[in-house]
Image (cartoon, rainbow, N blue to C red):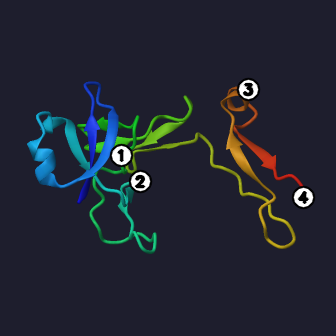
């Protein structure tokens, strides 16, 4: 069994299914279906057991999801752009923030004390886009 994404008239993924190639070939709209690899992201293939990069074929840059765009010229599934300031990385067909995320601070035991979240408003105000959200003390 393989995974297939149905592409609508605007090039967007409308559904993803698991099916045999023979089933896809029997559909009246066979040309609207494109195979996708569940173990592919960022142009790399990952072992489903270990999560480590392996020698598998990285099919179409990313596993398709509903709302992803299928770019015929790149032969790639591209996720929706999360923020207007983020740019597409050609090699991976993933979006990248205009500045790297800072390292998350840790406590004395090495546990993260919070996480960062992107704020387009802060970025546009010139304050940097990553906002630290501290975990509440329990």
Q: Which label sits in the foreground, 1 or 3?
A: 1
Provide the residue designation for mark 1: 64
Which of these two is toward me, 97 or 78? 78
Residue lying at 69% horizontally and 43% vertically, measured from the top left: 117
Provide the residue designation for mark 3: 125
- Between discs 2 and 1, the one toward the N terminus: 2
CA gap, disc 4 and disc 3? 33 Å
Provide the residue designation for mark 4: 138
Q: Which label sits in the foreground, 3 or 2?
A: 2
Which of these two is toward me, 117 or 136? 136
Residue 131 in the figure: left or right of residue 60: right
Which quadrant, please, contains the C terminus? bottom right
Q: Please state the horizontal and vertical placement of residue 65, each as a whole percent of the image.
A: 39, 43
CA gap, disc 3 and disc 2? 30 Å
Q: Are marks 2 and 4 in contact (CB under 8 Å)?
A: no
Residue lying at 41% horizontally and 53% vertically, measured from the top left: 42
């Amino acid at each position: 069994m393989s995974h297939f994404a149905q592409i609508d008239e605007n090039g967007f993924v409308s559904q993803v299914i698991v099916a045999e190639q023979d089933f896809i070939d029997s559909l009246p709209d066979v040309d609207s279906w494109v195979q996708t690899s569940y173990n592919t992201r960022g142009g790399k293939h990952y072992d489903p057991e270990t999560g480590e990069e392996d020698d598998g074929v990285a099919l179409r840059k990313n596993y398709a999801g509903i709302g992803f765009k299928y770019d015929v010229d790149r032969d790639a599934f591209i996720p929706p752009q999360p923020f207007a300031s983020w740019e597409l990385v050609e090699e991976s067909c993933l979006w990248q923030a205009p500045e790297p995320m800072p390292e998350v601070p840790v406590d004395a035991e090495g546990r993260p004390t919070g996480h960062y979240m992107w704020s387009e408003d802060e970025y546009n105000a010139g304050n940097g886009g990553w906002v630290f959200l501290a975990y509440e003390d329990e």
